[in-house]
Image (cartoon, rainbow, N blue to C red):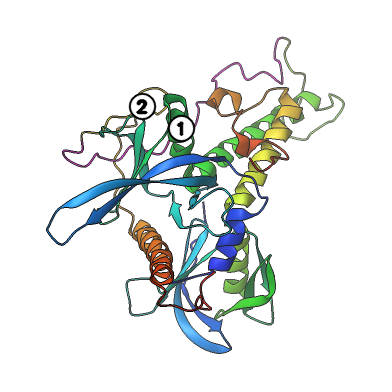
Amino acid sequence: MKLNERSVAHYATCDSPTDHAGFLHKRVERHHHHHHHTTSYHRRWFILKGNLLFYFEDRESRDPLGLVVLEGCTVELCEAAEEFAFAIRFDDAGAKAYVLVADCQATMEGWVKVLSRASFDYMRLVVRELEKQLEDARKSLAACHKSPRKSSSGRKSGYIPAGTSCSDHDGGCPKPPPLPPRRRLAAGSGCGALATGLSLTGQESPVSPETACFSKLHNWYGQEIAEIRREWVQGSVGQCPSHCI
Amino acid sequence: TAPALHPPLLNALFFAVLKKRLVKLVVNFLFYFRTDEAEPIGALLLEHCKITKEEENVFSISFIEEPDRKYSFECDTEEQCQEWIEALRRASYEFMRRSLIFYRNEIQKMTGKDPLEQYGISEEARFQLGTRKL
């Protein structure tokens, strides 16, 4: 699968606003040929920009090792052997989950909170809410400033009754936009969720076919880089292929 | 609501060869497919990109760090071309962030209140003006 990797890497490392950053341990499952697998953790430098979570080998790395698109996913606390573990799980059943471990409770909570609201959809929701509020504010302001001398044919004009305040949205405080609906937890996953700050709408959204595109993208990106590194380590590649960055 | 972009089939000019591709805009990614396949063959992340109207029915996408490299798309009609340009220009997360900051500012100026406070997200770095890299 092709991607404009150079642009992606540039976006990841340039000066555009970074929404969160820090070290986390990322779980890696290794499958051995004797049908058992080991679990290990790699310490990685994570950067969140918008709905994209990038991770790097370390803070000074020029190119990301991987990219997670935070659409169609839930972020939950994880009951793992490790303390301060949380998981990013996707609606797409075939997509692998990401299990991340923070170094303390505060760090973990910070990440879970910010990742839960990182989706494009959530941002779009908030923007629409504000768009509406601005519209309402403009209407109120226009009503207040309407000149009483203006004669409008057939239209009501007049004085604002005393007591009405333009800048006060007293009646009907706008509700905060709900967080994206919680998806159904995978059976037997035994994962909990932060009670505060996450609104449980009880709504289940169907798996979006588009989110499957993102899991493929994650896999491709991760594999490509892993393969290149493997080759480099094994010394079988003299120089980096031209298509990689 | 996002405009329904139809038909999604565009003639995509990659490396000067015009190929018919199924193109799907999903959040800030443009996925493209060979018309008969279910899996995308590629994607473009639409951040820090410039959408340019080229000749009739044609627009191009280029990226900030490589302005001369253009991904060109030919539409069936000029109207369709405009639709795509509009949609793609609004497709980035960064565009939404800027819109949000703008609305927040305007509302604050008009009402004296920060609209994000009630949502408990007023302190988040991504909503501040002039956010610097952490």
Chain of the residue where label 1 is placed in the rendered structure: A
The range drawn in magenta is A163-189
A152 on left or right of B61: right
Tell me, yes or no, if residue B46 can be seen here: no
Q: Are marks 2 and 1 in contact (CB under 8 Å)?
A: yes
10 Å crowding of disc 1: few (<14), some (14-19), many (20+): some
Position above or below: A87 against A218: above
Tell me, yes or no, if residue A106 can be seen here: yes
Q: Where on the picture, by quarter, is residue A31?
A: bottom left
Q: Which residue is mark 1?
A: A113
Quarter that holds the N terminus of chain A = bottom left
B100 on left or right of A123: right
Are tags 2 and 1 found on a single chain?
yes
Image coordinates of residue A75 in percent, x first then y, are 37, 38
- Secondary structure of the residue carrying tag 2 is loop
Looking at this rendering, what residue extends furthest in the left direction? A34
Separation (CA) of disc 2 from disc 1: 9 Å
Tell me the kind of residue under disc 1: Lys
Position above or below: A77 against A93: above
Chain of the residue where label 2 is placed in the rendered structure: A
Q: Is residue A187 magenta?
A: yes
Image coordinates of residue A128 in percent, x first then y, are 56, 41
Q: Earlier in the sequence, mark 2 or mark 1?
A: 1
10 Å crowding of disc 2: few (<14), some (14-19), many (20+): few
The label shown at residue A150 is none
Q: Is residue B68 magenta?
A: no
B56 on left or right of A236: right
Quarter that holds the C terminus of chain A = bottom right
Q: Nearer the viewer, residue A207 or A110?
A: A110
Q: Which residue is mark 2?
A: A194
Dominant secondary structure of the residues highlighted in magenta in the image: loop
